[in-house]
Image (tube, rainbow, N blue to C red):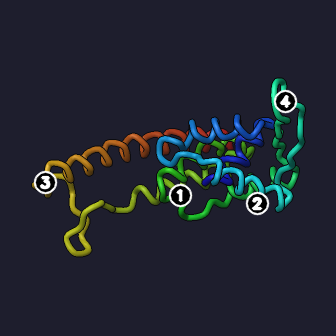
Amino acid sequence: MLELAILGFLYDAPLHGYVLRRHIAALTGHVRPVAESTLYPAIKRLEKAGLLVRATEPGAVAAPRHVLTLTAEGGRELMRRLAEPAQREITDENHWFTLLAFLRHLADPAAQAAVLRRRLAFLEEPASFFYDGDRPLSAEELDDPFRRGVLTIARATSRAELAWLRDTLASLDGVGR
């Protein structure tokens, strides 16, 4: 999720490390704060893999600043990750939101639609946070008001996402015609 966010934001424009951190925190920080001890090793891994380069600029007031730029290989890697996301990026909501934030970079509407169809298929599978054996429980079957709340909120969120997915897929399918 972090590497995808780094590649995605750098695809838009070269950024200083602290600005990149702010962007990532705005996207994912509500779920998982972005610590320097996490971000900078990920940047180093991507740099070592040739997916981004770091240039030093003189600082306006203090120390020099590092500007990160995506390489052509980094752009290709971003496109690969967007077109062929790992299953976790489809099924885990936080990973999904990170993927979705950059899916516009895929130029092919059919490729975008293929990713959205994977998410749609996942959401259409019967699921619950709570089970009776192998059978998913619905909110109406629960006496616990808090667990019922979890399922009621999840159902509303899923319905909204399903409606958005179907509308967006119809729009993308219309582009391809």
Task: Determine whether 48 is above or below 29 in the image.
Answer: below
Proximity of marks 4 and 2: CB atoms separated by less than 8 Å:
no
Q: Residues within 10 Å of mark 3 (few under 14, many from 20)?
A: few
Name the residue nearer the viewer: 16 or 6: 16
Proximity of marks 1 and 4: CB atoms separated by less than 8 Å:
no
Name the residue nearer the viewer: 139 or 48: 48
Report the mark closest to the observer, 1 or 3.
Answer: 3
Proximity of marks 2 and 3: CB atoms separated by less than 8 Å:
no
* Quarter-of-image position of residue 19: top right
Instruction: Name the side, left or right, on which 107 lies relative to 153.
Output: right
Name the residue nearer the viewer: 63 or 52: 63
Report the mark closest to the observer, 3 or 4.
Answer: 4
Q: Which residue is mark 4?
A: 59
Q: Measure the alpha-carbon separation of dots 1 and 3.
A: 30 Å
Q: Which residue is mark 1?
A: 90
Label placed on residue 45: 2
Q: As drawn, which residue projects farthest toward the bottom?
A: 133
* Quarter-of-image position of residue 170: top right
> What amino acid does circle 4 point to?
Gly
Asked whether residue 84 appears in the rendered view, the answer is yes
Report the mark closest to the observer, 4 or 2.
Answer: 4
